[in-house]
Amino acid sequence: MRKSFALAAASAVAGLTLLAGAPANAAPAGNASATAADTVPGCVATFFWRPFDSYLSVNMKNTCADVQRVKPTFNSDAVKAPCYVLQPGKDATFKEVAPGPASFYQFRGLVHC
């Protein structure tokens, strides 16, 4: 009985480890992987949301002292976002009808363009 319990406990721990997956700060999968040079500074604020589960929307605001060229990236190449030139203190919004259920698409962040 004790051996069965120990085996079950060990299996449960191993299963939880697999469920944990990749760390939250892991680079995006696929060809959208970001390098340190692509990273946009923290002074560019973003807000991602999916209104009505059919649209994708990313609000971007530049609170940096200099101009930032940024592009929203997603977990799929089906979403084509343009490059935005954000002057200091200015904002922009990317909006697009999702090519399929919006809940499938995950916002990966901004990259320099």
Image: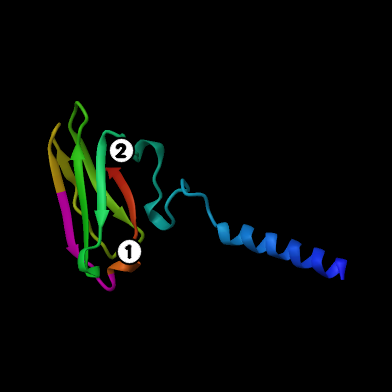
Colouring rule applied to residues: rainbow
Residue name at image x 30 percent, y 53 percent? 73
Asked if residue 58 lies in the magenta stretch, the reply is no
Rounded to the nearest angstrom, the CA distance separating label 2 from label 1 is 21 Å
Amino acid type, label 1? Tyr
Task: Indicate which disc, 2 or 1, sits on the residue closer to the N terminus.
Answer: 2
**Mark seen at residue 105:** 1
Q: Which image quadrant is residue 107 in?
A: bottom left
* Mark 2 burial class by Cα count in 10 Å: few <14, some 14-19, many 20+: some
Q: Quadrant of residue 79?
A: bottom left
Please state the horizontal and vertical placement of residue 31, each as a whole percent of the image: 39, 55
Residue farthest to the bottom, as pictured: 100
At 25% from the left and 49% from the top, the residue drawn is: 47
User: Going 36% across and 36% down the picture, which residue do you hit?
Assistant: 37
What is the magenta range? Answer: 93-101
Where does label 2 land, which residue? 40
| Quadrant position of the C terminus in the picture | top left
